[in-house]
Amino acid sequence: MAYSISQADIDIDKDKEILTELWRRNFGRVPEGRFKWIYENNPSGYPTCFLVQHSETGSVVGSFSLFPRTIFIHGKSVQALISGDLVVDQKHRVIGLAIKMIKSAISMCDRNASGVLLGVPNEKSYGVSLKAGSEILGDVCEMTQVLRTFSYIRKHIHFPFIARVLSSLLDLKFRVLARGLFRARKDNYAIEIGSGFNEEFDELWEKLLEKYSFVGERSSRFLEWRFNQSPYNKYKVFTLASSRNRVLLGYVIFCANGEKVTIADIGFDGTENSFTELLSSFSLHQREQGAESISLSISGHAKLINLLEDMGYSLRSRKKKVLIYAPAKLKAALKSIKTARWFLTYADNDI
């Protein structure tokens, strides 16, 4: 079967209808307002959308988009294009088509010249992306911190009393670790749970930018759009500030599903101390609220991942990789990134 790929104009109503119909056929129910949020309101700009047409019938059988994401490399603003919303009707899912899609994305990046292509490909497109010129930036580290161990131990030990004794000992170890990292200095900090983003987040973002060589924009405007306007989840914001002058030191954006908490994004002033205090205080707070575990997907420099492990986060998987493709103009700037200070979270991935 032969296919052609053409760039769509998302301002045209018929293309919007084509996209939403593809989603309905392949994704099932789509949240109300998704198109407006992800295609029209992105503060980094409109995405580039491609339609996949079956040459024999002329029908549109798939699509994919490149979403703009503002990142900073050594303090300079660069537009990243994040591949997402890849959808193809079941009977047209062939290997050759995937290759065409990836090549179209890379061609777009080359034409842009001053931007990069960034993403976390699935297993099928991983090898093709590498052959096309993408490089591995780093691993996606799937990490979990267990706050209350009883339900986990109970799955393997069928005697409740023994499971309770073991879980009590393990939970005590967590409390000692967390308090050693944070509670001894608790009076120095103020914590809050909210949902809004103000100018304090912009000031925090500027501090982070000064200390990190590769990081995605985390301005209040971006965070408001990315999380508060999202039609998918209701997010909360945990903040840590100095009790002396109320200067914001860091935040954790998260959502909870029962006793399981998922971190969606982290922001801090770029210092190791603030990062440690932020995550330790967040863990203590979640445990006090009855949470059993915290999960986090993050990519970053080795020291940052090691800090998380020191705070009790266990590494569940490193299977996924962050791939980056850069045109010739930016290749030199990217060489030093892997050994520099950098990190990416859910906020930087396919949206």
Image (cartoon, grey):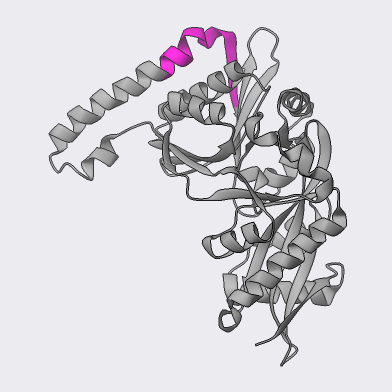
Q: Position of residue 150 (x, y in %)?
A: 26, 35
Q: Which residues are magenta?
A: 178-192
Q: Position of residue 300 (x, y in %)?
A: 59, 35
Could you tell whether 95 is left or right of 161 in the image?
right
On the image, the x and y values in percent for residue 107 come to 80, 63
- Residue 344 within the magenta-colored segment of the rendering: no
| Residue 179 in magenta stretch | yes
Q: Is residue 28 visible?
A: no
Task: Check the picture and name the quadrant holding the C terminus.
Answer: bottom right
Q: Residue at x 78, y 36 (%)?
A: 72
Residue at 86% in and 55% down: 112
Q: Main secondary structure of the magenta part?
A: helix
**229 is higher (above) or lower (below) than 125:** above
Q: Is residue 134 left or right of residue 146?
A: right
Instruction: In the rendered view, tell whether residue 83 sits above or below residue 201.
Output: below
- Viewer-side residue, 50 vs 261: 50
